[in-house]
Image: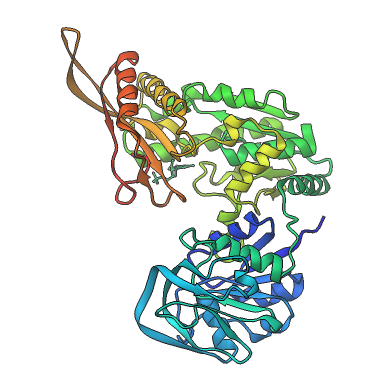
Amino acid sequence: MAHQKVLVIDFGGQYNQLIARRVRECGVYCEVEPYTKGLAVAKQEKPVGIIFTGGPNSVYEENAPKIDKEIFELGIPVLGICYGAQVMAHLMGGTVSSATMREYGKTETNFDTSSLMFQGLSENMITWMSHTDYISGLPEGFRASAHTKECPVAAMENPEAKLYAVQFHPEVMHTENGTKMLHNFLYHVCGCVGDWTMGDYAKTAIEDIRAKVGDGKVLLALSGGVDSSVLAALLSKAIGHQLTCVFVDHGLMRKNEGDEVEQAFADWDLNFIRVNAEERFLSKLAGMSDPETKRKTIGEEFIRVFEEEAKKIGAVDFLAQGTIYPDVIESGTGDAAVIKSHHNVGGLPDYVDFKEIIEPLRLLFKDEVRQLGIELGLSDVLVWRQPFPGPGLAIRVIGEITKEKLDILRDADWIFREEIAKAGLDRDIHQYFAVLTSMRSVGVMGDGRTYDYTLALRGVTTTDFMTADFARIPYDLLATISSRIVNEVKNINRVVYDITTKPPSTIEWE
Ligand code: XMP
């Protein structure tokens, strides 16, 4: 089934992905293309609408990203956002000027609600602005449909030509009713019907996989993370036993996690191989304390183990990868990086005998991957799993790793997670875990002196994991967690909570 498609043309703005996500949240499929390819793609694919993103440039700069004016002559509705609005004004013969002061942040804005874009909304709303240049002269045929104190053209439109532009960012949550404005553009201007649902997507993806794979064999490295688990579920529905999943249990997972992953796939139609490689990894890591050395060792060993399993299976036709859309867009060119570098499987294709890579999730955002997992009936444990680093607990035991330390950490981390879940905070805190600092300090227990480990708890809220704030876990809850940990876990006599943001810290301690 072909979906209606909207084309988001990227002029280098920091919110390009957010725009695409908002469009999809409105039930409309969209793809992002760089401005250099925008016109060609629009002509070939005939999208129902086009959105220009913002960007850091000024339209008058020599190498400012531009697009051929022909884009406005295809009869396809266009919405320009921020720099995209200025590009439209400039190309259509209006004037863009540089203001002496930047307009930045939440801004009171006055709207003409007779515009299709602002239909049904209030006349005064807050928008999010971030610009120095502004549209000072309207192009012929356009009228202003919103203004602020500083900005005479906060929005403009030429409804006959189906051209619309907003100086502010409707995609960010600080703009009141921003998603409704995008919804208005999509449904009232572009004529979208909202045919992008995960149920439809799953059906189409399964048919596509069957057509592509035929009766070939597919190999997948399953980590138990959201992406690889959803991919396993999708492939299993599509091709059943033609799929082999190799799950390398490196012994660095959280408490019970290896069994949970195995259990979650017990009833699925696929070949599931679990490799218990704990001893192998621990003996490789013995005596190592430098974080980068530990990471590299684990990455390399992972490849060795996977390679050995792949050899046992023999030649396969396809290697499946859990690449998702943010990886595709981030590369900037529209060409996906073949393998996600932060997955500790980097370099796999060199070691495994296969003909082709398939990436069935490459058009989905993370939240869509989760929706797809739910649609396919994957267990909540896997669908809502918080991110977990490839090197696992090896980078949450500071310095040298031993089985004993890992077990202490696992028990403490388990209590932390259990209490957070009990308090109903497990989806509000985006990532939370315990770290065994390997530092010892003096304590007193009963009548005796102790000299035991200090455990650190880390909990963060974040949207993109590039920046993060520490989660404001209530003191009383921290008290319960701390008391349970020192009482129930041997060798811990002190618990601290990490109150640093990222930057300057990172989320993980190593
Ligand atoms: P940092 O510590 O860099 O972490 O602030 C950002 C996010 O990335 C995760 N992380 C990793 N994920 N392999 C992964 O798959 C890794 O080597 C790795 N290191 C960090 C981390 O858990 C956080 O979500």
Please name whichever residue, 175 or 201, is drawn nearer the observer in this view of the structure: 175
Give the camera-side residue of 509 and 379.
379
Give the quadrant of ligand 1. top left
The picture places residue 121, in percent across and down from the top left corner, at: 57, 65
Q: Is residue 68 above or below residue 282?
A: below
> Can the viewer see residue 113 in this picture?
yes
- In this view, 109 is above or below 352: below
Residue 336 image-quadrant placement: bottom right
Left or right: 301, with 319 as reference point: left
Picture residue at 72% right of the left edge, 48% below the top: 355
Q: Splitting the image into 4 quarters, where does residue 68 fall?
A: bottom right
Position of the N terminus by quadrant: bottom right
Relative to residue 99, is residue 179 drawn left or right? right
Q: Position of residue 90 (x, y in %)?
A: 54, 87
Q: Position of residue 184 (x, y in %)?
A: 65, 66
Q: 254 or 135, which is in the foreground?
A: 135
Q: Quadrant of the C terminus?
A: top left
Q: Residue at x 29, y 37 (%)?
A: 498
Front residue (pair 34, 99): 99
**Is residue 321 shown left or right of residue 135?**
right
Q: Position of residue 171 (x, y in %)?
A: 53, 62
